[in-house]
Amino acid sequence: MFGGLHAPRALPDAGALVALARSFTPRVEAHGPTPVLLDLSGLGRLWPTPHALGQALLDAAAARAIEAQAALAFTRETALVVACACPGLHVVPAGGEAAALAPLPLALLDATAEQQELFARWGLRTIGDLARLPPAALAARLGPEGPRLVHRARGEDAGAFVNAPLPERFETTLELDWPVEGLEPLAFLLTRVLEPLTAALAARGAKAAALAVELGLSDATTHARSLHPAAPSGDARTWRTLVLLDLELHPPRDAIVRVTLRASPTPARAAQFSLLDPALPSPERLAETLARLHDWTASGRCGSPQLVDTHRPGAFAVSSFAPGPLPRGRPEAARPAPRVALRAYRPPRLAHVLTKAGAPSFVGAPGVRGAVTAAAGPWRVSGDWWDSAFSREEWDVSLAGGIALRVFLDRLRGCWYVEGELD
Amino acid sequence: MRAATLPALPWTTFDDVRSPCPEQRVESTGAVQEPAAASVAERKRALEDLLRARRLQAEAPPLRGEDRRRQPLATGIAELDALLAGGFPRGEQSEIHGPASSGRTGVLLALLARTTGMGALAALVDPLDRLDPASAAAAGVDLARLLWLRGPRGSGEEPPLKTLAQATGAVATLAGAGLFDVVALDLAGADHERRRLPGSTWLRLQRVVENTATALVTLADGHVACSPGGRALALEPLELRFSGPPGPACLLKALRARARAGRHGLRTAELVLAAV
């Protein structure tokens, strides 16, 4: 006998109905989150009647806060369709499949939109209307799909029961005979735990996008860490390095008695290599290198500089370092000539500036001081009046010592600043 | 039946190699005939020619698996590259030093621009937080390929010794990773604190970078360290050129500097860095 379970309302979890079905039988066929089909063979020894078994299914669903409807029948198709159509519990007796399906609407049958439209034009409304048609005539009009639909409408099964695969958990635990203190002995143990884990991932063609580390400590507490590198990796050595680097920064409080690693699998990266493009850095090595620079990355002081679409002087952003492939067709000759660069003072240094005929004649600021020998400017910049306004006059000046500076007068505050050296 | 012949295309890019062969004939029905054996041989030859041509182009991105460990990294400034015998060598520790406004940052950005323009990666360890991204972009640096490690805010004037020690540690990590063609350490402006670093720091960096494809370049106010195979480039400011007499329309036009290469600075060259 087969059982169909259907949840008409949204499920709290996509796999909730399958998990419920698995608590009754290991043979479960899933058609998405809902409905699911259960092979109930052998359960008669636990529940004396089909009604008792069906009620047990509904009770279990209610206990898990799932609003479900169930149907038990001797064919799979009947159990599924009746479960989807009728609320509550329905038990279809042997031989009564066609009669149970006949009054149900045709839309419940697994037909394509074109077939549904065609059936509507033919005047078919219920499953029984379709079941009465000769299969040979439908085969002439719809091909092999025609007889298949008629058999399903009559509650006859076609094809085999497809058992849904069990959800895989990539988790390894190592119980230690005696507590381990320090990271050096842990490194060897991590290798023992990580290698079977990454081998299991590789066997499924997957890599680990994240790794949860749980260290059971001798004071009966758990030290949990979660690692999310920039790119998924299936390399045990890379993961071991990342785990050790993380534990160096967040060491456990006590000796370790148990190591549990849980990987979040993700499909392996599919990369299309190009013959003439430069090789991109290995994501694993890049993630490992950035993890070693934790002092810089943790405080947001490491990344790729980015220009910001604004006229505000000195505005920039820092994004995470993730170089992509070179854009194709980039002109080779577009390289600019060598230029004078600004070595920016952050924040700009407050300066004492003397002016003569409106132009700076002396600049004094922490680290720089001297008479101005030549000056270019002023260049007025202003903007962002609707937010935090800026307005300034910029000058490029050359001091007597030979140093060139960019100074500016903040016109809103009336103060002079040195923005940086021209170098 | 009328037969149309596709126009012959010059074999200039890889896309062209993948495009339909000129010998393919398109029938009026739209069916495409199989290419003849001779056309396959021509494709192979064209591809080999293209690969050979790309290998001869020093500026082209390194091919997958191509070892350019022996090729120095050029700055793109002809006078300097001639002075440095091709550029800054890989696997060595080199240095650019000079006083403020001698063009040392402009030279470093030119090197980073050239390197990132090739498709390679570069890293800049900047404990004083002096890099101006707008200047770097104007110099042609591909900012997406530049890893920038900035010092803590407020360390601009004279960073603490701890920051410099962290910076040299980061340089060792980056140079040892083998991912970057250039790892630059900007110590200009931190001359006093830099002298307090242990002398073994530079020897350790030299040992880390040797036998790698990374060129380690230090930017400083004065001579710091240079490995035996590295290049020492000393810059000296000559003049600042303005577009005219002081006044409202005056612009800083260029910076002229003298470069000396080698330990004794026997070879010299003049370079001009544009300001506008």
Image: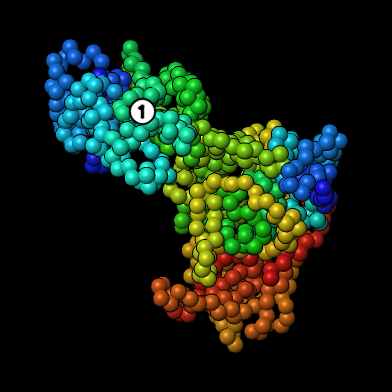
Comparing B124 with A230, the one in front is: A230
Q: Secondary structure at mark 1?
A: helix
| Disc 1 packing (10 Å; few <14; some 14–19; many ≥20) | some
Measured as percent of width and height from the top left, residue A257 is found at 31, 19
Q: Is residue A183 left or right of residue B222?
A: left
- Number of marks: 1
Residue at 50 percent of width and 27 percent of height: A205
Residue at 22 percent of width and 20 percent of height: A94
Residue at 19 percent of width and 22 percent of height: A93
Comparing A305 with A117, the one in front is: A117
Residue at which label 1 appears: A151
Q: Chain of mark 1?
A: A
Residue at 62 percent of width and 40 percent of height: A280
Q: Is residue A253 above or below residue A353?
A: above
Q: Is residue A212 left or right of residue B218?
A: left
Q: Is residue A325 above or below residue A63?
A: below
Measured as percent of width and height from the top left, residue A114 is found at 42, 44
Measured as percent of width and height from the top left, residue A183 is found at 41, 25
Q: Quick check: can you spot residue A132?
A: yes
Measured as percent of width and height from the top left, residue B167 is found at 54, 45
Q: Is residue B42 left or right of residue B253?
A: right
Q: Quick check: can you spot residue A220?
A: no
Comparing B44 with B135, the one in front is: B44
Q: Quadrant of the C terminus of chain B?
A: bottom right
Quadrant of res A133: top left
Query: Disc 1 residue type?
Result: His
Which colouring convention does the figure follow? rainbow
Q: Is residue A29 above or below residue A290?
A: above
